């Protein structure tokens, strides 16, 4: 199984399928690290509207905007919640889509940097005084 390596960007997907009736079926939690299967957990405790269900009005990723208050010195570039249980095919599709979007954004940043290289800051001149303050009009 794939693991998260320190000091490198990693795509992590957690997909949860909550059971409607824990007596007849177990809920499932699948983790993927860079689209490779991480852990698969099947438990009765993974129920709909219980601890693995996400309430969008009560969801907080971190409680602080200060890096020293974050757990484990982690950095998050993008975070997204999608409805439904994602299968391996959907995870591969989403990764490919995100790579295309990322490449597009990086290309736009490179273009902007190239444009900035041709620019220079000129000395800014003070505005001329208004005409009504000219000595000839004051008298």
Image (tube, grey):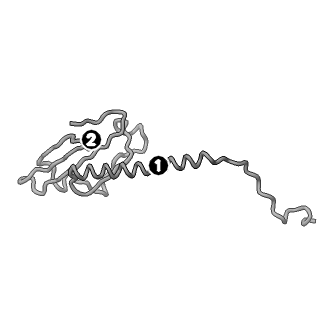
Q: Please identify the quadrant where the N terminus is shown.
A: top left
Residues 15 and 64: in front is 15
Identify the residue shown where x is 62% and y is 47%.
Answer: 118
Secondary structure of the residue carrying tag 1 is: helix
In the orientation shown, which residue stands out farthest toward the left?
24
Identify the residue shown where x is 50% and y is 46%.
Answer: 110
How many numbered marks have been drawn onto this rendered protein structure?
A: 2
Identify the residue shown where x is 25% and y is 35%.
Answer: 3
Q: Position of residue 24 (x, y in %)?
A: 5, 54
Per the image, the residue denoted by label 1 is: 107
Q: Please identify the quadrant where the C terminus is shown.
A: bottom right
Secondary structure of the residue carrying tag 2 is: strand
Per the image, the residue denoted by label 2 is: 33
Residues 67 and 84: in front is 84
In the orientation shown, which residue stands out farthest toward the right?
139
Q: Position of residue 35 (x, y in %)?
A: 26, 44
In the image, 135: left or right of 104? right
Mark 2, residues whose alpha carbon is within 10 Å: few (<14), some, or many (≥20)? Answer: some
Mark 1, residues whose alpha carbon is within 10 Å: few (<14), some, or many (≥20)? Answer: few
Q: Position of residue 111 (x, y in %)?
A: 52, 49
In the image, 115: left or right of 91? right
In the image, 77: left or right of 42? right
Q: Earlier in the sequence, mark 1 or mark 2?
A: 2
Q: Quadrant of residue 70?
A: top left
Please name which of the two marks, 1 or 2, marks the residue nearer to the observer: 1
């Amino acid at each position: 199984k794939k693991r998260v390596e320190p000091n490198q960007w990693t795509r992590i997907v957690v997909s949860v399928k909550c059971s409607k009736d824990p007596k007849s079926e177990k809920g499932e939690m699948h983790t993927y690290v860079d689209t490779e299967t991480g852990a698969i957990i099947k438990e009765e405790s993974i129920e709909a509207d219980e601890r693995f269900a996400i309430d969008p009005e009560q969801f907080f990723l971190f409680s602080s905007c200060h890096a020293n208050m974050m757990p484990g010195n982690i950095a998050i570039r993008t975070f997204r919640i999608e409805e439904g249980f994602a299968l391996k095919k959907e995870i591969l599709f989403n990764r490919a889509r995100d790579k295309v979007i990322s490449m597009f954004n990086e290309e736009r940043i490179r273009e902007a940097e190239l444009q900035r290289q041709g620019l220079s800051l000129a000395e800014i001149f003070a505005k001329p005084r208004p005409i009504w303050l000219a000595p000839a009009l004051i008298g």
